[in-house]
Image (tube, rainbow, N blue to C red):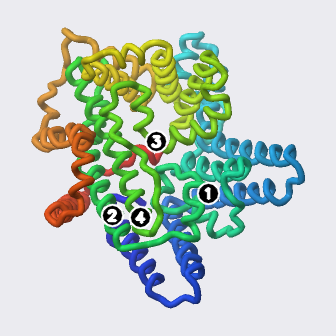
Amino acid sequence: MLFSSMLFLWIFLAAVIAVNFLFTCLPFKTEGTRIAAKNGFLLIVSLLFYAWGGIYYLILMLASIVLNYVGGFLLEVVAKNPKQRKAYLVLVIVLNLAMLFFFKYFNMLIVIIESLMNTSEGFSGVWTSMIGMEGTGALGFKEIVLPIGISFFTFQAMSYVIDLYRGQANLQRSLIDFALYVSLFPQLIAGPIVRYSDVELQLHGRQESITLFVSGQKRFCYGLAKKVLLSNTFAQLADDIWALETNTLGAALAWFGVVAYTLQIYYDFSGYSDMAIGLGRMFGFTFKENFNYPYTSCSVQEFWRRWHISLSTWFKEYVYIPLGGNRKGKFRTYYNVFIVFLLTGIWHGANFTFIVWGLFYAVLQILERLFLKKLLDKNPIKILNWAYTMLAVMIGWVYFRSEDILQANEYVRQMFSFGGTSQHSILSYLSMKVIICLVVAIPLVGFVQRPLQKWYEKVRYRVPVMAADLTLQCVLLVLAVLLLIGGTYNPFIYFQF
């Protein structure tokens, strides 16, 4: 079920808000009983929300919930000494990763094995088949369907067990509360990744208020507008350009395509995160931010501090720091950075394009730590730093978006084929709708908001500003609904992860 769908907006969400409000009004013996009733209700609707994609998916998520819930008891109740605690931790992590590997990477493994078996075409044929992700079917395995959001809820569930082991969280004895933490529908299928220690207290002691609800409503409306009005427009444009024969694009259209995708993925994912954070606030949950104007960054390091913050934080807390972080010398720091970004690429998908994407950022991060960041800091012309960063980001998005490495390599070559000829006119893709969206979207990636942030915090509660805010929310909501009624193109990029 999509947040940006009529079914979710006018039936599911409306019903959940109404029933949750009813629980607020009904008399309960204690506030704890009220929260327990709300948790049970939210768990039921969250499971229904996920089951909308198929009962098969729901069974898998329930298995993940039980695995990590039992793992918590093994750590805190059954284990008799530190060695046993560590053994149980390793067991639970291995089982989580095995489940994730099977459903997300087994198909890729089969393609690699089948490609290596097909030696009749020589090394070049094997290599082309492998990086093109084209299996021969020799092993006869059926393709495994990727469950929606498996990477997100697996990482969330693992954070609970790891936080327990570190002593950063308490054992959750209520299976209902733990299941709600893993399956809470606002952030279930595309994040942000919520660490258990960040919401532990909110599960049984959150405070709902009109102020928080209104804040969540506002955030949801803006996120919905990002997704429906902007991202969907750029998604259609990017898909149309990427569907063309890559070697016929020419530089202008290739750049136009990657700009469209750069804007699409930002407004898609940040819009979804805004909606998730907003929905959480409506029900009393406060989730941490997942984006902080990443396209205004002036270095790759800064970009990754601002892009998909919950994933970067997860890898920092559970991979980078345990590996030693920057505490064991420069060489070990570079090694740790390399491992983290390799895993970041692998986490995003079972394709060599994601591995190259991750390694690309690993190399840039290491270069910045070696010498490049010092040059960037000394450079007085900061717009050049921004241009370097966005160039790197857009080249990275080419590999992220492409079907395979061969297509990505050719696309990058087309981007820099200045002076060449194109079989397509960029003007045929510049509709009035696209032009308007470009004019709105480019300044709003952060160039407008960042300079005005402090000013807005000072005036946001003044009546004229609040009235303007509410009016804008209503206008954006109406426009988004009109497009949804018209059956607008409506994918979500991060559902595949």
- The residue singled out by tag 3 in the image is 309
**Label 4 Cα crowd, 10 Å radius (few <14 / some 14-19 / many 20+):** many
At 21% from the left and 57% from the top, the residue drawn is 459
Q: Badge 1 is on which residue?
A: 61
Q: Can residue 134 be spotted in the picture?
A: no
Given residues 238 and 280, the one toward you in this image is: 280
Q: Is residue 469 positioned above or below 395 on the image?
A: below
Q: Earlier in the sequence, mark 1 or mark 2?
A: 1
Give the Cα distance between marks 2 and 3: 21 Å
Dot 3 and dot 4 residues touching (CB under 8 Å): no
Q: Secondary structure at mark 2?
A: helix
Instruction: Mark 4 and mark 2 in contact? Answer it, CB < 8 Å.
Output: yes
Mark 1 or 3: in front is: 3
Q: In the rendered view, would you say 424 is above or below 31?
A: above
- The residue tagged 4 is 281
Structural distance between the alpha carbons of marks 4 and 1: 24 Å
Query: Which comes before the other along the chain, label 2 or label 3?
Result: 2
The Cα–Cα distance between marks 4 and 2, rounded to whole angstroms, is: 7 Å
Horizontal arrangement in the rendering, residue 486 relative to residue 314 (left or right): left
Identity, as a three-letter code, of the amino acid under mark 1: Met
Can residue 65 be seen at all in this image of the molecule?
A: yes
Nearest to N terminus: mark 4 or mark 2:
2
Label 3: state its secondary structure.
helix
Q: Estimate how packed mark 1 is, as few (under 14), some (14 to 19) or many (20 or more) residues with alpha carbons within 10 Å.
A: many
